[in-house]
Image (spheres, helix red, strand yellow):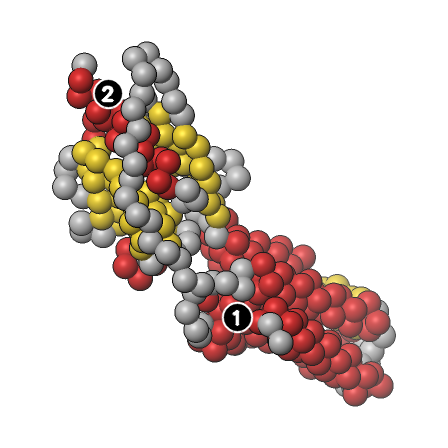
């Protein structure tokens, strides 16, 4: 049985089990909650909106199914990388706790109330407790899934010499993205939007502020031309990190892991800077300042060849 088969079987069983628990929880107290029941609480913690018991239940189950599909997609698409496997388990674990906690809080607040207006108040600390439990479950899921090595990446053999003809201009473009980071950013935004819909704007601030920068730094486009190296981030290709050609001493290809350069995303250490979105081969620039600049990007050897050729051409002028 392959990894994908095992993962699909386990995640499918987990998805069905959590959905069954959500449905069973509602059925267990169906006769003790009003219909419609309170489904929105204002900033003061008092109920200010309602929804039918059936609709509220399916909203909770639907939210869980969306999160589960995202988690499964991460695990299946990035199964060769340990970080992807860990992100998939973290999404499935944290999403289950968040969905179950959200529905349980709603049912608890409505328990034994004659009408939805008489439901219990849900103070802000209750929301913080739910988010903390979700974060803890996600961390435990990451810790559990962060096992085994990445698929082995063979180190590149040296950088071939590229010669440009007089007057010839060349451009090299490549890109890279970290799918787990993108999904985490999207999930954070969805959680923030869900909290806004539930009229919990203060609780929505943290996931919204976290989701946007994660999405921005989860992908990058790198271009090498006669002006130097330009790395643009995110779907809007902004912000842009520019390294002028006169700032570069040489280029090469090196194999680097996230822990070696300070972690994922854009990292600055005393002796190096890195755009690390996946482990493996990186375009490594030796700057005239003595620092190293690492960019994890696809096919970096061609980019290194062009950088060195442009430096040689510039020095000959």
According to the picture, the residue beneath numbered tag 1 turns out to be 90
Judged left or right of residue 55, residue 209 is: left
The answer to whether 251 is drawn above or below residue 107 in the figure is above
Q: How far across and down, in percent of the image, does residue 96 sit?
A: 62, 74
For residue 98, which quarter of the picture?
Answer: bottom right
Q: Residue at point 40% right, 25% down?
A: 171
Q: Residue at point 22% right, 48% down?
A: 272
State which quarter of the image contains the C terminus. Answer: top left
N-terminal-most mark, 2 or 1 = 1
Q: How far across and down, in percent of the image, does residue 184 sit?
A: 53, 58
| Residue 284 at least partly seen | no
Q: In terms of secondary structure, where does tag 1 sit?
A: helix
Query: Crowding near pointer 2: few (<14 within 10 Å), some, many (20+)?
Result: some
Tell me how far mark 2 sits from mark 1, CA to CA.
Answer: 49 Å
Query: Crowding near pointer 1: few (<14 within 10 Å), some, many (20+)?
Result: many
Q: Residue at point 75% right, 80% down?
A: 20
Of the pair 9 and 117, the residue shown nearer to us: 9
Q: In terms of secondary structure, where does tag 2 sit?
A: helix
The furthest residue to the top: 167
Q: Residue at point 31% right, 62% down?
A: 259
The answer to whether 108 is drawn above or below residue 171 in the figure is below
Total residue callouts = 2
Q: How far across and down, in percent of the image, does residue 141 sit?
A: 50, 75
For residue 61, which quarter of the picture?
Answer: bottom right
Marker disc for residue 269: none
Of the pair 87 and 130, the residue shown nearer to us: 87
- Eye-nearest disc, 2 or 1: 2
Marker disc for residue 313: 2
State which quarter of the image contains the N terminus. Answer: bottom right
Of the pair 309 and 95, the residue shown nearer to us: 309
């Amino acid at each position: 049985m392959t990894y994908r088969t095992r993962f699909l079987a386990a995640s499918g069983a987990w998805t069905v089990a959590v959905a069954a628990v959500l449905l069973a929880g509602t059925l267990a107290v169906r006769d003790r909650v009003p219909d419609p029941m309170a489904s929105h609480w204002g900033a003061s913690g008092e109920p200010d909106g309602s929804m039918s018991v059936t609709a509220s239940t399916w909203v909770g189950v639907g939210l869980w199914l969306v999160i589960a599909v995202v988690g499964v997609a991460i695990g299946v698409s990035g199964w060769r990388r340990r970080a992807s496997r860990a992100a998939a388990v973290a999404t499935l674990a944290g999403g289950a706790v968040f969905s179950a906690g959200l529905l349980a809080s709603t049912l608890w607040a409505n328990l034994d109330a004659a009408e939805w207006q008489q439901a219990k108040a849900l103070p802000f600390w209750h929301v913080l407790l739910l988010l903390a439990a979700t974060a803890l479950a996600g961390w435990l899921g990451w810790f559990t899934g962060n096992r085994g090595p990445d698929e082995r990446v063979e180190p590149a053999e040296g950088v071939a010499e590229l010669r440009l003809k007089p007057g010839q201009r060349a451009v090299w473009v490549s890109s890279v993205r970290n799918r787990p980071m993108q999904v985490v950013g999207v999930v954070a935004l969805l959680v923030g939007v869900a909290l806004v819909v539930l009229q919990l704007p203060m609780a929505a601030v943290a996931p919204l502020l976290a989701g946007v920068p994660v999405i921005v730094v989860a992908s990058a486009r790198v271009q090498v031309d006669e002006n130097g190296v330009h790395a643009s981030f995110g779907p809007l290709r902004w912000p842009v990190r520019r390294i002028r050609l006169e700032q570069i001493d040489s280029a090469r290809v090196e194999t680097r892991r996230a822990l070696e350069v300070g972690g994922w995303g854009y990292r600055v250490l005393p002796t190096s800077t890195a755009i690390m979105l996946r482990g493996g081969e990186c375009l490594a620039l030796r700057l005239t300042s003595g620092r190293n600049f690492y960019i994890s990007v696809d096919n970096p050897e061609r980019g290194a060849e062009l950088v060195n050729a442009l430096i040689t051409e510039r020095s000959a002028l």
